[in-house]
């Protein structure tokens, strides 16, 4: 959700339409990919907390700032293909 989809290996090209649609949704929201992904998860009433990993102090700061954005009116982007949803199936 946070990577530039154009830089992924060709295995993921079969989902280019989904990736492009998601990026347009994010762009229209005026949020970054990180802000959208985090805020969408936080907008779900049944989710109390979101677990994230970081590799640097700067990344942690970005995540903290992103979590403060308004996340009340974000649209979902449903994907039903199990081969994309389940990372253990990725190549």
Image (cartoon, rainbow, N blue to C red):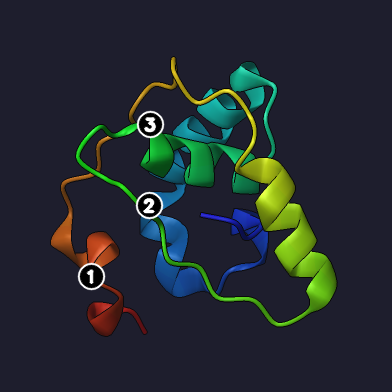
Camera-side residue of 44 and 16: 44
Camera-side residue of 20 and 68: 68
Q: Residue at x 60, y 43 (%)?
A: 67
Q: Earlier in the sequence, mark 2 or mark 1?
A: 2
Circles 2, 1 touching at the beta carbon (< 8 Å): no
Report the residue marked by disc 3: 43
Q: Residue at x 73, y 45 (%)?
A: 65
Instruction: Check disc 3 and report its element: helix, strand or loop.
Output: helix
Q: Where is residue 72 shown, x and y percent of the image?
A: 44, 18
User: Which numbered dot is residue 86?
Assistant: 1
Q: Residue at x 75, y 67 (%)?
A: 59
Instruction: Check disc 1 and report its element: helix, strand or loop.
Output: loop
Q: Is residue 27 left or right of residue 20?
A: right
Q: Residues within 10 Å of mark 2 (few under 14, many from 20)?
A: some
Instruction: Check disc 2 and report its element: helix, strand or loop.
Output: helix
Q: Nearer the viewer, mark 3 or mark 2?
A: 3
User: Which numbered dot is residue 55?
Assistant: none
Report the residue marked by disc 2: 15
Q: Where is residue 31 shown, x and y percent of the image?
A: 67, 30
């Amino acid at each position: 959700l946070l990577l530039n989809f154009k830089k992924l290996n060709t295995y993921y090209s079969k989902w280019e339409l989904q990736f492009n649609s998601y990026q347009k949704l994010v762009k229209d929201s005026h949020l970054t990919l990180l802000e959208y992904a985090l805020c969408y998860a936080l907008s779900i009433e049944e989710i109390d907390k979101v677990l994230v990993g970081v590799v640097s102090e700067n990344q942690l700061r970005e995540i903290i700032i992103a979590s403060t954005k308004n996340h009340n009116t974000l649209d979902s982007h449903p994907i039903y293909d199990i081969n994309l949803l389940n990372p253990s199936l990725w190549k």
